[in-house]
Amino acid sequence: EEEDEGEGFDISQLNEPVQEEFEHVKRQNVSEEGKKGACVRNQLLIWESLLEMRIHLQRCMNTANMMPMSDKYGELKDCKEFAEESNVTMNNVSTVLDKFLTLQNLLLKNFPDTK
């Protein structure tokens, strides 16, 4: 009876299906890990871009903070050169704000999960 049990049980037949399932799971994991890696890389690129933008905006804020206070503004607004430069600056700031709002809408449209 012991020999009959040993002959009917083939270990190689058991290992093959398990290996195939494992290989299939392994391929899925590699694919998922690749997708995760791409997402992480994109997040890092976005983070670096935002950090660079923050650095540039900080320079703008430092310059804006050097502008005269309201008591000096009354004296300077009569100056033609100051009025022209302040109008150009306001137009530039307005353009940047419009671009930021457009970017925000675009990002919300393409990535609704971020809401």
Image (cartoon, grey):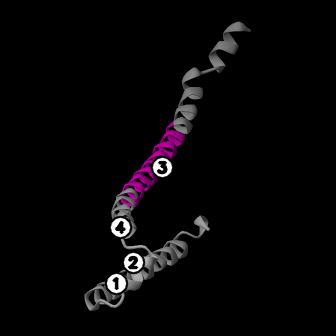
**How far is disc 1 from disc 3 in space, using C-alphas?**
56 Å
Do the residues under discs 1 and 3 have CB atoms within 8 angstroms? no
Crowdedness near tag 4: few (<14), some (14–19) or many (≥20) residues, C-alpha within 10 Å: few
* Comes first in the chain, label 4 or label 1: 4
Give the residue pinned by disc 3.
36
Name which residue type carries label 4.
Met
In the image, is residue 39 above or below residue 96? above
Q: Which mark is residue 76?
A: 1
Farthest residue, direction left: 81
Q: Amino acid at mark 1?
A: Leu
**The one of 8 and 47 positioned closer to us in this rendering:** 47
Identify which residue, 23 or 36, lies in the foreground: 36
Question: Do tag 2 and tag 1 residues touch (Cβ < 8 Å)?
Answer: yes
Tell me the amino acid under the disc marked 3.
Lys
First of labels 1, 3 by sequence position: 3
Q: Disc 2 marks which residue?
A: 72
The answer for how far apart the CA atoms under marks 4 and 1 are is 14 Å
What percent of the width, then of the height, locates residue 83?
32, 89
Q: Position of residue 79 (x, y in %)?
A: 29, 89
71 left or right of 114? left
Q: What is the secondary structure assignment of the residue under circle 4?
A: loop
Of 58 and 45, which appears nearest the observer?
Answer: 58
Residue 55's place in the image compared with 72, above or below, is above
Give residue 27's position: percent from left, percent from top.
47, 43
Q: Are marks 2 and 4 in contact (CB under 8 Å)?
A: no
- Magenta residue span: 23-50
Between disc 4 and disc 1, the foreground one is 1
Q: Quadrant of the C terminus?
A: bottom right
Discs 1/3, front: 1
